[in-house]
Image (tube, rainbow, N blue to C red):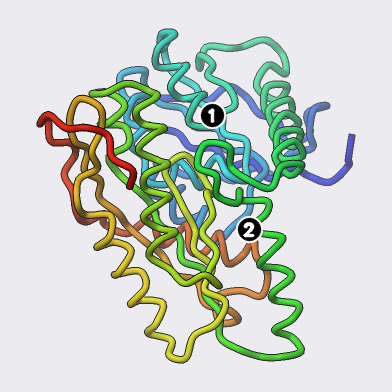
Amino acid sequence: MSNAALRVLLVTGEGTTLPALASASAFGPFEIHASDDLDAAMVRLGSEHYDAIVVAVKTVDARKLLQWPALSQATSEPALIVLTTDEPGAELATQLVRKGVQDVLPTSIDAVDALPRAVRLAIERKGQDKLTRKAYATDLMTGLPNQSQLVEHVNQLIALREREPAPMALLVIRVEGLASAEAKFGAESANVLRRKIAVRLRVGVRASDVVASVGPDSFAVLLPRFQDPQDADRVAAKLAAALQPPFAMSGGEAAVSVAHGIAHYPADGKDAITLLRRGSGLAASAQAVGGTGYANRPGTAAND
């Protein structure tokens, strides 16, 4: 095991306590940071790197994590572990895992080194998952480049920019409404909706721009060159408008709302991970605008 301290963010909700996570545990060492709630944790994620995030919530509040604006960001780089005060049930635990959560455990675990062991193993699993995903250049669900491919492409472009300076921006788009579509139409329909969103985003940008999938509810658009810094804002507005018309689904229609964040190179960062973290943080904290869910009207799935 590496001797480098693993950065862990502990988030405790009201009425919850965390089992011991000793910084000098045999499964560490850990560099422990703390946040009082999810809002404070979301702010930290916009500017800081963590190897793992441990969130303790009341079981009745665990479902709210599925709607947490920073969920994609919290599962993209770190390993996210959720602790609940009681057994959350198979359905909720499965939903959380499908959204990228590494493990769902009770706050009552009290065996020696139980939480440190869970954190360490979650970090290791996350690392293996990243290596596996890196072996594939695309997100199989949408056909778009995945996060690893996007990061590699951005870093290659930055290396070029060091010799030929030019403005560049990374736009991160957070989509709300996928959970509503899944609840109404089923899990496979939510996957279809993601593919339709990907198509509209790809159609809405230039051939030289790169659209990537960076989370269950998040996409990124690399704008490699533009004339005016405001061009990135105009692209963001154009794409938000493109996602406003409801999506035809089998059995009805689904509408989504979007929030975005823009990270500019070099002002907001000089490497891909920093730019992505900045854009994701801004998208997570921004108010989503647009659709309000789904319209339960008969419809036929269309080729968006």
Determine whether the residue tagged by mark 2 lies in a helix, strand or loop: helix
Mark 2, Cα crowd under 10 Å, few <14 / some 14-19 / many 20+, is many
Pick the residue in front: 196 or 27.
196
Lateral position of residue 244 relative to residue 222, left or right = left
Q: Name the residue under label 2.
A: 150
Image point (44%, 50%), residue name: 42
Q: Position of residue 185 (x, y in %)?
A: 27, 23
Instruction: Say what amino acid the circle numbered 2 marks.
Output: Leu
Q: Is residue 126 above or below residue 70?
A: above
Determine whether the residue tagged by mark 1 lies in a helix, strand or loop: loop
Lateral position of residue 205 relative to residue 140, left or right = left
Q: In this view, does 97 lie above or below 159?
A: above
Where the N terminus falls, by quadrant? top right
Image point (49%, 63%), residue name: 221
Instruction: Say what amino acid the circle numbered 1 marks.
Output: Val
Mark 1, Cα crowd under 10 Å, few <14 / some 14-19 / many 20+, is many
Q: Residue 239 got which mark?
A: none
Q: Please name which of the two marks, 1 or 2, marks the residue nearer to the observer.
A: 2
Q: Name the residue under label 1.
A: 101
Lower sequence index among marks 1 and 2: 1
